[in-house]
Amino acid sequence: MARTKNASPTLNGTCGTAPASEVLEQNMKKQKQEFESMLQAMRSEQENMMSQVQSMMAAQSEQIASLKREKFSFQEKMMSALAEVKALKEKKSPSLTTLADRVEWRIENISQKMGELHKGAWLESPTFSAAGMSDLKLDFYPNGSSECTKQGFCSLFVWCPANTLARYKLSVGDRTVEFEHRFDKDEPRGRPNFCLLESQMDNVDDSVTVALEFISVRHDEHLPNGMKLTSRLVDYNRQIESLAHKPVKRVEWQIDGLQQKMKEFPKGVCLESPSFSAAGISDMVLAFYPNGSSFCGKGSCSLHLRCPPRMQVRHRLFVGKKQDQPNSDDMWAFWGGLDFNQLQGQVEAGADVVTVGVEFLGDPATAADTASLQL
């Protein structure tokens, strides 16, 4: 029987498996699918990012457009406000504002304000124009400023532009004080111990009137290139009044309610007369201290005459029938040494009134040329 021979084995050693080329192709297809999947994911992520960036850019564009609209609206409002201010300025009358020399400020409900405001707190007036100046302002302290040392006294100050030399009067009710100040700094000028407020209030309508009156003003304004502009305000009405009263040689001031005023005006505080003109001099004022000036002894009253600077006139002051010695001081002339009992002797019987005044002792004048002025 013939012997059967076994089949010869394959030479590639891959009996029962796919060829190597097919395996390599399958691997490449698998890697390609993975790469395409990863690329698709990257594209999707990129699209999401681009969408977010576009949304952010759209939001920023909207914000920018909103800001532009707000800016345009603000500019329109500013232009409208400037037009209104310009119109108001054009409507103002210079004769009633910048050229006015007296401003009054009526403060209502003053009792309530005194209760609401503590010492050192103030009421501020609206800004105003007067005497050729703008941006003026008054500060009124119903209960006194921090520098006020007298119980129940109020304080009053005025703000003026820098480089201004002003002669002016401040008033609270009937109480008037004259000042001459140079405003070199950004600070107000006035008096901390001005007056007893309750004595100057209008009890009928619970108000008080505060006033500022300019007598003369000099304002210097420095311009470029070394130039300086100087403006002056002179009260020509007072000069005319001075000429009209030139023949007056005697001025009498009748003070009513003396006993009450002695209670209201302590030592060192005076009543001031209205300003007057006599003997060819204008803007003179009598100041009467019922309880004496700061320099007088206890129980004395004082009478002062104030004249404009650099003016000199020979005069004699009197209280009732008592007269002092002739005086010719060029600023303040004062008379002390009249004690309380003597003052009582000069009060008109049963009238609570005393008459004080000044007699000018210039060149002799005929009877037709002399006259008396009663304040």
Image: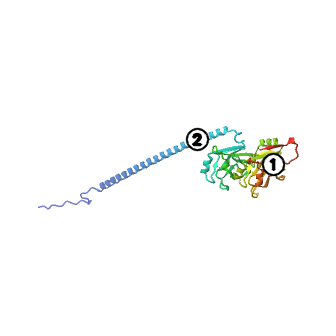
Name the residue type under label 2: Lys
Name the side, left or right, on which 229 lies relative to 50. Answer: right
Mark 2 = which residue?
A: 77
Q: Can residue 246 be seen?
A: no
Q: Who is closer to the viewer here, 297 or 52?
A: 297
Q: Nearer the viewer, mark 1 or mark 2?
A: 1
Across and down, in percent, residue 336 comes to 78, 55
Residue 375, given in percent of the width and then of the height, sits at: 77, 44
Tell which of 40 and 278 is nearer to you. Answer: 278
Dot 1 or dot 2: first in sequence order is 2
Q: Is residue 346 left or right of residue 72?
A: right
The kind of residue on which mark 1 rests is: Val
Mark number, residue 251? none
Up the image or down, 150 lies above or below 65; here it is below
What is the secondary structure assignment of the residue under circle 1? Answer: strand
Choose between 195 and 78: the one closer to the eye. Answer: 195
For disc 1, the marked residue is 358
Q: Residue at x 50, y 45 (%)?
A: 63
Task: Residue 37: tell me if it is visible.
Answer: yes
**Relative to 90, residue 158 above or below:** below
Point out the image quarter for the N terminus: bottom left
Q: How crowded is the residue under tag 1: few (<14 C-alpha within 10 Å), some, or many (20+)?
A: many
User: Residue at the front extreme?
Assistant: 350
Q: Position of residue 195 (x, y in %)?
A: 69, 51
Residue 152 in the image: x percent, y percent? 65, 53
